[in-house]
Image: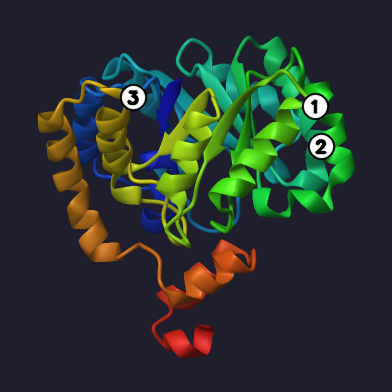
Amino acid sequence: MKLLDCTIRDGGYYTGWDFDNDLVLSYLQNFENLPFDYLEVGYRSPALEGYYGEYFYCNIDTLNFLKDNSSKKLAIILDEKNVRINMLDELLDPCLGIVSLIRIAIDPTNFDRAINLAIEIKKKGFEIAFNLMYMSNWNEYPEMIKNFSKLNNLVDYLYLVDSYGGVFPNDVRDVIKRVRANTNVKIGFHGHNNLEMALANTLVAIEEGVDIVDSTILGMGRGAWNLKTELLLVSLAKNYGSDINFDSLSDITSKFQKLKDHYNWGTSLPYMVSGANSLPQKQVMDWVSNRSYSLNSIT
């Protein structure tokens, strides 16, 4: 099984995708001693309205800095709703030889359109992950699940993304079973922590034999946060005897603690309610960040 840390990419929802260079360098150096296969370092994106920082666009200088300071495989993500086939040369050609894995964030309603995007990305020689969002609502898309066979021999990983943080272990088992009945693609899991089930769900996914799972330092990520990298590693050490360099793990978590103290990410009653009812994280995150609303008003 492989591990992917996406702190820089997912944590950007709090920092506007700007991170201090010394912090990123320390992140890269410490992860040299941790058993992760991939580091997802940001987005590649066409220019969008509003401000988005360095790790949202990941220009060539940024990518070279990352590659020069890490032996890990680097991953970036494309948000399918913003990317079209005619943009791929500009977005991905600079990544050749630097980035190994392209992950595509996909709304289930755009499943077929994303396949066409993946076909063109694969021609460029990248590994591809199909990050299919809103896992707790997949029952609304039975035809999509039947069409998972279209991913065979095209993508390297099909990710179950618990976007709302609302699934439970039995849901994870059920979805993995249904995925395997319809495709032979390797499976990944990305859990959110609205109901504080990210670790339990990820461990069940591992027990069910998924091929790759995600986490972030101190759980840093959009909305209620993700599975904590340090918690995952401690759990793997306990349950599977994984060898963990706790000096490196402690060093990098202490450095990110300053960001956590500032942004105060984590679950709360509004995130719990939104997770239980599969409501969008973005809107809740905006409300929670706006101190003019009480938690009772938001709920």
| Secondary-structure class at tag 1 | loop
Residue 39 appears anywhere in the view: no
Residue ID at (44%, 41%): 9
Total marks in image: 3
- CA distance for labels 1 and 3: 37 Å
- CA distance for labels 2 and 3: 36 Å
Which residue extends farthest right? 143
Q: Position of residue 214 (x, y in %)?
A: 45, 36
Q: Position of residue 288 (x, y in %)?
A: 44, 75
Q: Position of residue 39 (x, y in %)?
A: 39, 28
Q: Earlier in the sequence, mark 2 or mark 1?
A: 2
Left or right: 244 with respect to 132?
left
Q: Amino acid at mark 3?
A: Leu
Between 107 and 158, the residue placed more toward the observer is 158
- Label 3, residues with CA under 10 Å away: few <14, some 14-19, many ≥20: many
Q: Nearer the viewer, mark 2 or mark 3?
A: 2
Q: Nearer the viewer, mark 1 or mark 3?
A: 1
Q: Amino acid at mark 2?
A: Ile
- Up the image or down, 136 lies above or below 33; here it is below
- Up the image or down, 139 lies above or below 116; here it is below
Please tell me the numbered disc located at residue 66: 3
**Which residue is labeled 2 in the image?**
145
Residue ID at (30%, 37%): 235
